[in-house]
């Protein structure tokens, strides 16, 4: 009755919720029972966003507690650090190397964690972590908005699900004129 | 066909499949998407009512008309609609009515935590509680059948994790319904609750509860699932799912109907299970009733928290404390140091921001209300002294001014909130003559819950054009002589209106009218800081706009970092331009 637990985290407006929708649907296509949970509300106002997806033969709870996440996909470095406690010891973290300084940093007196601190925390928390240039890849393709699909591509490398399922769901979920771009974004993520 | 649906989407689908023809609500997290989804289905009339009480009255009317109806609200919405719940429990209907109460344990986006199971007992109506999206859909139809069979409103209680979690749902067809108009089934002794008639209804309600308790014994979702008989778990709603994760082998009694309770079923389960453990979020509702039945509860609220939301980790930790499981999940302690928080803030360019900037300047007591502007409670704005529930601001400010403190108290209230619950308070100020200034923050939408239309937007939920409510005319009709309208993005105009209103020493209304930034198709402008002119005085930081950030350039004399504007976040409202004394902030000429 093993389940695979994912947490997707980031900042309002980064496309976290669309990515978790896609991830959930891919799980269904791959034949799993799937649950997904997220809290709406103030995400639009630039707050942190956390969504969880679970795949398994039979999934009961729509979310898990700390220490139970297999894959942490973070859209932003600071938000990744904030959620490290969710990871299992043997969990894998995939972190977009983007920095979005919150107000406390950009106009207040606090400091954004240094690269050294970030690396140290990530290596402590996970057996395997990847800091990936998902934003840069998306920008190369012409739009930041595809960052989420690049990250899904990177995640897909760790999962035993046919690529066609991913591409099919991505196609269904993005606006028609961006399908080709998002296919490329997914491929770019897989190449990371 | 099975599809992934959120609990809210599933409820909407359930309404469609079970032949609901009327649905009403006032937005409120976590319930909002129910109506937003219902409106997409053919054959259901759907509306945003001005508040939950009106939504419920209207749904009751539809049920009196013999139709199937649904009203949806967040937990605190049921406080507003409580009167309607109670009278409708007395009258019952010709048709069917399901009332959705979406509770918010953990208060993800609410002003208080409350367990609305108490309302079922209080108002003597049945309550159903789904454990996932499939049941959320099915329970709408089941609830309507119960409503029609037992002549009662039915409460369907969801929680944030049911509303906003997705699971697989089997879709069905819409039940065929006759679109007929029958004569109104006149029955004043049943539908007119004057004391003499209401007195006759109360015993009917008591009998109904007995009948429902009998029905609960065989209700298919009050289910015993036998496993290891040494441990018997009793659970409801999403707590059932968490407990299932933590106790994969135990026996379960899951209660899909949390009022009235199936006493025989519970006693029978308890007598066959070794230890009885109750896992329920918030209040010890089931636990107390089990104890009243004489069932010994081995673990309940002495271990499982009464405060906040559960998750499998919390349930497991509590079970471990109680000695019910042998191990917990190890949470790694990782030294990340102190991390800068990322709370939600008013958007760059939000029209509410300058209003609070001005109120801070005048050192007023600010009594506020519920909406995006509640973010003005926190830094960097931090200009709010009281905030209770929808509509509270005006009454509280009036009371403070009448009782008397050194400062003047003013009320700030959003447009949607004014229509919802602000009007009687506004009337009270002018009727009972206090010098309260009420600022109506008219951003032309219900922003906080996702930009729904409301009675002065000129649009309905179904997209029809309609009458536009007029705050200024409303205030005048109530008897206000001091009524002003300003654009809050014009600081001079805003300050003059505020000053004149305060100086009048009379009941006064200031309508600050400027659209929420989500009402624009594109941003009107973009601003930048001329670093040559900026002397790092920090004045622009006082307005608390997230687009204004520290630049890397240091002002030589003061050693202070100069200001810079983040070109992605800036919306171009020009408020910073107006506060800069050095004329260092300008619009980017395109
Ligand atoms: C009784 C009740 N119903 C609904 C809500 C959910 N809710 C919170 S704020 C809000 C609307 C606020 O709209 P408005 O007053 O126009 O302010 P804005 O967010 O647009 O600034 C709603 C519906 C609530 N908190 N309480
Ligand atoms: S959504 Fe609109 S009202 Fe809310 S903070 Fe943003 S600009 Fe202001
Ligand atoms: S113009 Fe100034 S205050 Fe307005 S959004 Fe831009 S930076 Fe913020």
Image (cartoon, rainbow, N blue to C red):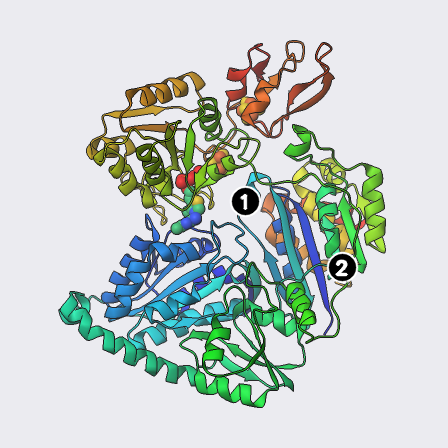
- Can residue B521 be seen here? yes
Residue A57 lies in quadrant: bottom right
- Can residue A29 be seen here? no
In the image shown, does B139 or A83 lie closer to the viewer? A83
Real-space Cα separation, disc 2 to disc 1, in angstroms: 28 Å
Horizontal side of B139 relative to B545 (left or right) equals left
Q: Chain of mark 2?
A: B
In the image shown, does B196 or A36 lie closer to the viewer? B196
Residue A42: which disc? Answer: 1
Q: Are marks 2 and 1 on the same chain?
A: no
Reading the image, the residue beneath label 2 is B331
Q: Chain of mark 1?
A: A
| Rendering coords of residue B370 (x, y %) | 43, 43
Horizontal side of B147 relative to B118 (left or right) equals left
| Rendering coords of residue A153 (x, y %) | 75, 51
Residue depicted at 80% across the width and 47% down the height = B335
Residue depicted at 36% across the width and 46% down the height = B463
In the image shown, does B219 or A182 lie closer to the viewer? B219
| Rendering coords of residue B231 (x, y %) | 63, 82
């Amino acid at each position: 009755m093993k389940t695979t637990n994912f947490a997707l985290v980031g900042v309002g407006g980064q496309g976290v919720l669309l990515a978790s929708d896609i991830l959930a649907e891919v799980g269904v296509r791959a034949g799993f029972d799937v649950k997904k949970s997220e809290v709406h509300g103030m995400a639009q106002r630039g707050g942190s966003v956390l969504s969880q997806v679970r795949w398994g033969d039979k999934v009961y709870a729509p979310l898990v507690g700390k220490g139970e996440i297999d894959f942490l996909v973070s859209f932003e470095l600071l938000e990744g650090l904030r959620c490290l406690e969710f990871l299992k010891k043997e969990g894998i973290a995939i972190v977009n190397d983007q920095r979005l300084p919150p107000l406390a940093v950009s106009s207040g007196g606090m400091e954004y964690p240094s690269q050294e601190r970030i690396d140290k925390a990530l290596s402590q928390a996970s057996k395997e972590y990847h800091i990936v240039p998902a934003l840069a890849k998306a920008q190369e393709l012409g739009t930041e908005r595809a960052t989420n699909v690049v990250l899904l591509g990177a995640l897909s490398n760790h999962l035993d699900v046919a690529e066609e399922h991913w591409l099919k769901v991505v196609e269904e979920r993005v606006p028609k004129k961006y399908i080709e771009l998002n296919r490329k974004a997914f491929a770019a993520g897989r190449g990371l | 066909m099975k599809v992934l649906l959120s609990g809210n989407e599933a409820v909407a689908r359930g309404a469609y499949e079970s032949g609901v023809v009327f649905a009403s609500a006032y937005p409120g997290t976590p319930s909002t998407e129910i109506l937003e989804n219902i409106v997409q289905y053919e054959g259901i009339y759907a509306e945003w009512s001005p508040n939950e009480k009106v939504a419920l009255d209207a749904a009751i009317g539809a049920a009196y008309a013999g139709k199937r109806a649904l009203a949806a609200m967040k937990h605190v919405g049921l406080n507003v609609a409580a009167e309607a719940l109670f009278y409708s429990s007395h009258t019952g209907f010709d048709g069917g009515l399901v009332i959705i109460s979406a509770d918010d344990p953990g208060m993800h986006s609410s002003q208080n935590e409350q367990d609305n199971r108490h309302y079922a007992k209080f108002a003597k109506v049945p309550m159903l509680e789904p454990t996932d999206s499939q049941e959320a859909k099915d329970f709408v139809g089941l609830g309507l059948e119960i409503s029609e069979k037992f002549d009662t409103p039915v409460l369907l209680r969801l929680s944030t994790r049911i509303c906003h979690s997705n699971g697989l749902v089997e879709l069905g067809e819409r039940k065929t319904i006759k679109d007929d108009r029958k004569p109104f089934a006149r029955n004043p002794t049943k539908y007119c609750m004057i004391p003499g008639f209401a007195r006759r209804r109360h015993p009917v309600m008591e009998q109904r509860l007995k009948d429902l308790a009998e029905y609960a014994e065989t209700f298919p979702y009050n289910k015993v699932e036998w496993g290891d008989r040494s441990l018997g778990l009793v659970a409801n709603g999403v707590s059932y799912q968490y407990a299932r994760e933590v106790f994969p082998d135990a026996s379960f009694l899951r209660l899909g109907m949390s009022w009235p309770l199936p006493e025989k079923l519970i006693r029978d389960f308890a007598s066959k299970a070794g230890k009885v453990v109750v896992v329920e979020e918030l209040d010890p509702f089931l636990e107390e009733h089990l104890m009243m039945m004489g069932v010994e509860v081995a673990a309940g609220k002495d271990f499982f928290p009464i405060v906040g939301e559960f998750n499998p980790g919390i349930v497991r930790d509590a079970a471990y404390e109680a000695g019910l499981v042998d191990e917990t999940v190890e949470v790694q302690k990782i030294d990340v140091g102190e991390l800068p928080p990322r709370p939600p803030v008013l958007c760059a360019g939000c029209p509410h921001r300058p209003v609070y900037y001005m109120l801070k300047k005048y050192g007023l007591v600010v009594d506020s209300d519920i909406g995006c502007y509640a973010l003005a409670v926190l830094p960097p704005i931090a200009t709010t002294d009281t905030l209770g529930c929808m509509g509270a601001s005006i009454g509280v400010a009036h009371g403070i001014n009448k009782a008397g403190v050194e400062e003047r108290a003013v009320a700030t209230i959003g447009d949607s909130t004014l229509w919802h619950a602000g009007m009687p308070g506004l009337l009270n100020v002018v009727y009972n003559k206090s010098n309260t200034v009420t600022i109506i923050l008219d951003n032309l939408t219900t922003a906080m819950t996702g930009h729904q239309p409301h009675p002065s937007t000129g649009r309905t939920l179904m997209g029809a054009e309609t009458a536009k409510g007029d705050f200024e005319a409303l205030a005048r009709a109530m008897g206000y002589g001091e009524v002003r309208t300003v654009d809050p993005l014009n600081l001079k105009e805003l300050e003059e209106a505020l000053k004149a209103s305060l100086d009048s020493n009379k009941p006064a209304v200031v309508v600050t009218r400027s659209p929420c930034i989500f009402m624009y198709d594109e941003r009107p402008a973009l601003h930048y800081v001329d670093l040559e002119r900026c002397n790092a005085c920090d004045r622009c930081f006082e307005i608390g706009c997230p687009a204004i950030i520290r630049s890397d350039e240091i002002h030589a004399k003061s050693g202070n970092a100069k200001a810079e504007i983040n070109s992605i976040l800036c919306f171009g409202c020009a408020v910073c331009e107006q506060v800069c004394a050095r004329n260092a902030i300008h619009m980017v000429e395109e």
